[in-house]
Amino acid sequence: MFAWVLLVVATCAAVEVAIRLPLLATVQRIVRHSKRSAIIIRAKAISDHWKEKSLQLHALRIFKYSLLLFAFIVMIVAPFFLLNVLSSAANIKLSDQLLTLVGTLASVSVAFAYITLRRRFLGE
């Protein structure tokens, strides 16, 4: 029973972290630099020397934003990991609960319910 409470707490914390992170803006930056790279590659008016210089900068920016996106994903998963570590000390298996189909569906349901309630009461 306590594992279910921890699952709800971890899910709500993960949703709060995900809401506060600039996920969409980061993905949009990756897409923007990818499109610019494709335009540069197809441009006949740009010499290969300048294409190489420009593509290196875009590749570096895409790499930087990809690492940032990975860090965001780690931050979103962190509440589950932290509560799993803390609960294992109390001999409660949160990971066993989460990795089942019922636990995953419960976590997704709690996330949707939390987002709905948050929007209704906070107006966000």
Image (cartoon, rainbow, N blue to C red):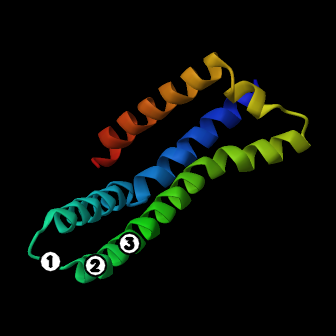
Foreground: disc 1 or disc 3? 1
Q: Disc 1 designates what residue?
A: 46
Mark 2 surroundings within 10 Å by alpha-carbon count, few (fewer than 14), some (14 through 19), many (20 or more)? some
Foreground: disc 2 or disc 3? 2
Residue for point 31% across, 77% down: 52
Q: Nearer the viewer, residue 118 or 23?
A: 23
Identity of the amino acid at label 3? Arg
Q: Which of 81 and 67 is in front in this view?
A: 67
Residue 19, horizontal then vertical, whole percent? 41, 52
Q: Disc 3 designates what residue?
A: 61
Label 2: element kind: helix
Residue for point 46% across, 51% down: 18
Q: Earlier in the sequence, mark 1 or mark 2?
A: 1
Residue 61, horizontal then vertical, whole percent? 38, 72
Q: Disc 2 designates what residue?
A: 54
Quadrant of the image occupied by residue 35 = bottom left
Mark 3 surroundings within 10 Å by alpha-carbon count, few (fewer than 14), some (14 through 19), many (20 or more)? some
Identity of the amino acid at label 1? Ile
Q: Quick check: marks 2 and 3 in contact, CB under 8 Å? A: no
Q: Which of 18 and 122 is in front in this view?
A: 18
